[in-house]
Amino acid sequence: MTNNIGVTSSSSVYFGKTDALLKQLLPEGRVIVISDSNIDRTHHELLTRYEYILIGQGEQAKSLATLDNIYRKLIEMGADRTTFILGIGGGIVTDIAGFVASTYMRGVKFGFVTTTLLGAVDASVGGKNGVNVGGFKNMVGLFSQPQFVVCDASLLSTLPKRELRAGLAEVIKTAILGDAELFEILEKSTFNTLCKESALLEDVITRCVRVKASVVAEDEREGGRRRILNLGHTIAHAIEKSTSQFSHGEAVAIGLYHITKSALAQKMIGESDANRILSLIEQYGFSTALPTDLNQLLKAIEGDKKRKGDSLHLIFPTAIGAVEDRVVAYKDLKTIFDNI
């Protein structure tokens, strides 16, 4: 198992075939899988090797009610502190599975098999586990690292193109904040090329994991540098709070587009680099217009968990491969975004 990237001293991402990796990574003893109905449809044979619990799909499944239902099922199944929880699915599944495992009986060991591009490059890596409350993203959660994350690119072949494209928003985000070479690779590629060339997609995923792992290793609990991973997400979360029109990745793309325009208006980034970012987002077919009134988005940002008093941290791109974490007063947000 040499093809792996360490995220922390206790957690690593492994690349390869799911069957072979799970045989090596899973501990002896009882394993209970948490997954969803979509994975049951596309990878049923994988789930049936274990006892499993299915949750609903979509952001509405990331709820306290879902947690309560899983806890009750685990109790009914007689799960104890020696039980290993395996989350198989995209970011919603791994968020839920990580949260459940970290809190059931004060914590049991867990790992993930990620089945979406967004999960592979972002959601399943780094130890964030959370659920939504009142429409606000990940308002309740904790930091707890999986023992492993299995990333098997062959599992992505069943993804609808819309979902694969949504995952590319997090890839673009990662390239902007920490990998200029990855940005160039994306510029020279197309969405269809990435869909067809598995080796290229695997390289893209590996690069993203390396960037995120390096950031998380330095700041596991988001007290400083890890905040840069929120590039584009303040606007994205406000969009998700305000409308159900876009998936998380699609909202991130819109957020990236407008935070870049804001950085350009404030002369924080050169025109050439800003135009490359804006063009790349358009090149991969993302919608870029704000889907709702700016005042409605600002109202949604009021509830952002990263807001501290009358200000919040906003991450701005300053070059291809570099960003700046700036504390912005909430009262100044309208002025900042009106300029774009």
Image (cartoon, helix red, strand yellow):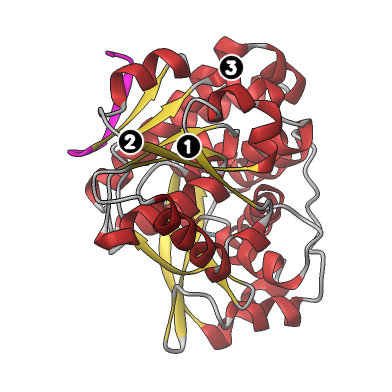
Q: Is residue 2 magenta?
A: yes
- Residue 137 in the image, given as x and y percentages of width and height: 56, 67
Query: Left or right: where does residue 161 sit relative to residue 26?
Result: right
Q: Which residue is mark 2?
A: 30
Query: Left or right: where does residue 44 sit relative to residue 162?
Result: left
Decide: is 52 above or below 256. above
Helix, strand, or loop for circle 3? helix
Q: Is residue 175 visible?
A: no
Quadrant in which the N terminus appears:
top left
Quadrant in which the C terminus appears:
bottom right
Q: Which mark is residue 109?
A: none
Q: Residues within 10 Å of mark 2 (few under 14, many from 20)?
A: some
Q: Is residue 113 magenta?
A: no
Q: Which residue is mark 1?
A: 51
Disc with the residue nearer the chain's start (1 vs 2): 2
- Judged by depth in the image, the label closer to the viewer, 1 or 3, is 1
Q: Residue at x 70, y 66 (%)?
A: 239
Q: Which residue is mark 3?
A: 154
Disc with the residue nearer the chain's start (1 vs 3): 1
Helix, strand, or loop for circle 1? strand
Q: Are marks 1 and 2 in contact (CB under 8 Å)?
A: yes
Closer to the camera in the image, 225 or 237: 237
The image quarter containing residue 29 is top left
- Residue 46 in the image, given as x and y percentages of width and height: 55, 24
Q: Which residues are magenta?
A: 1-10
Measured Cα–Cα span from mark 2 to mark 3: 26 Å
Q: Is residue 104 visible?
A: yes
Decide: is 243 above or below 19. below
Q: Residue at x 36, y 46 (%)?
A: 126
Residue type beneath disc 2? Arg
Q: Are marks 1 and 3 in contact (CB under 8 Å)?
A: no
- Residue 38 in the image, given as x and y percentages of width and height: 69, 38
